Image: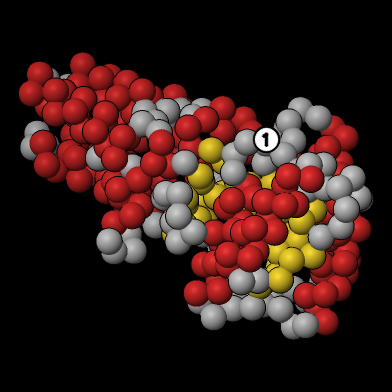
């Protein structure tokens, strides 16, 4: 299976739902107010936010009327173009080295597994990688990251369960600098985005990296479970305020029929999607591609 076909394949459930509704819409309605109202409802049913759906449909309507077009393929292609432009409103950052990537998110989104896959991704790209087990809240998290580090054949920096996460980050940064490591990946404890004390802990780790490793490029990525739907928007907004996010990593994309919230993240919050999990295997992580996502959506 090719590089981008995995991303399209992961969107199978979303595509089946949206494509079926689009076919019914074109069979039932000519282009007019009722058509555009239903098109907006289709987007919202796929978890595109109301605000983004309205903006996209208004643009489709304006272009179609301006070109006096009533052709189904033209309208579909136009919709795809506008959705792709929406995704590209949040440019994906270029990865520069050496770099530190800190992964944040709520409980249960798959941060530790994702870090293992991304470690393997960079190893395949011939980069040296270290992972930091700064989720010291759960012993299982340290053990789990250790397993993934072994699988990806990368170094791990860890302390005992209950240790200060910022101390783990400090040691990991010191080690990465000393060994001229290309990529340092930091796992953090899952946290409810309403807990101020946990957010303050994240801010502390953020400051440690910025202070101790200023020459490294520092990326902060929010890991989101794609099956969460529109609640992902609320999570992203709060984490963005806490640590100023550089991007999103989507997990479980193959398990959802409602991937539309991604358009709202990029269009409204201006946070790009950087990686997408497209399966269970260690190789099932891809750089996000806006064109392939839109093609997989319809």
The quadrant the C terminus occupies is top left
Q: How many marks?
A: 1
Instruction: Give percent across and percent down for residue 291.
Output: 32, 55
Can see residue 196? yes
Seen from the viewer's position, the closer of residues 91 and 3 is 3
Instruction: Give percent across and percent down for residue 113.
Output: 59, 51
Seen from the viewer's position, the closer of residues 177 and 27 is 177
Q: Residue at x 82, y 75 (%)?
A: 175
Can see residue 207? no
Q: Residue at x 51, y 46 (%)?
A: 250
The quadrant the N terminus occupies is bottom left
Q: Residue at x 29, y 40 (%)?
A: 12
Instruction: Give percent across and percent down for residue 135.
Output: 78, 48
Secondary element under disc 1, as helix, strand or loop, is: loop
Instruction: Give percent across and percent down for residue 69.
Output: 11, 37
Q: Residues within 10 Å of mark 1 (few under 14, many from 20)?
A: some
243 over 44 or under it: above or below: below
Residue 269, picture quadrant: top right
Q: Residue at x 29, y 56 (%)?
A: 5
Left or right: 18, with 199 as reference point = left
Residue 123, picture quadrant: bottom right
Q: Which residue carries the number 1 mark?
A: 107
275 over 72 or under it: above or below: below
Seen from the viewer's position, the closer of residues 218 and 281 is 281
Left or right: 30, with 278 as reference point = left
Left or right: 7, with 94 as reference point = left
Residue 149, picture quadrant: bottom right
189 over 37 or under it: above or below: below
The colour scheme used here is secondary structure
């Amino acid at each position: 299976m090719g590089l981008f076909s995995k991303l399209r394949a992961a969107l199978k459930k979303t595509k089946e739902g949206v494509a079926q509704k689009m076919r019914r819409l074109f069979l039932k309605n000519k282009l007019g107010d009722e058509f555009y109202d239903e098109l907006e409802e289709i987007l919202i049913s796929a978890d595109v936010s109301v605000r983004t759906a309205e903006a996209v449909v208004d643009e489709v309507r304006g272009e179609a009327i301006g070109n006096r077009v009533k052709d189904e393929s033209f309208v579909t292609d136009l919709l795809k173009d506008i959705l792709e432009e929406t995704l590209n409103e949040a440019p994906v950052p270029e990865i520069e080295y050496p770099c530190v990537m800190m992964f944040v998110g709520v409980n249960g989104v798959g941060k530790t597994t994702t870090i293992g896959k991304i470690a393997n991704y960079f190893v395949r790209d011939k980069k040296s990688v270290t992972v930091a087990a700064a989720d010291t809240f759960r012993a299982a998290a340290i053990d789990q990251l250790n397993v993934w580090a072994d699988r990806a054949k990368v170094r791990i920096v860890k302390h005992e369960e209950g240790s200060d996460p910022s101390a783990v980050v400090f040691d990991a940064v010191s080690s990465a600098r000393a060994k001229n490591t290309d990529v340092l990946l930091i796992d953090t404890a899952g946290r409810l985005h309403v807990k101020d004390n946990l957010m303050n802990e994240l801010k502390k780790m953020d400051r440690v990296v910025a202070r101790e490793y200023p020459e490294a490029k520092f990326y902060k990525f929010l890991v989101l479970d794609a099956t969460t739907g529109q609640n992902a928007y609320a999570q992203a907004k709060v984490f963005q305020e806490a640590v100023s996010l550089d991007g999103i990593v989507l997990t479980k994309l193959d398990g959802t029929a409602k991937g539309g919230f991604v358009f709202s993240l990029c269009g409204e919050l201006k946070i790009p999607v950087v990686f997408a999990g497209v399966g269970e295997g260690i190789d099932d992580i891809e750089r996000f591609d806006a064109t392939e996502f839109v093609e997989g959506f319809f």
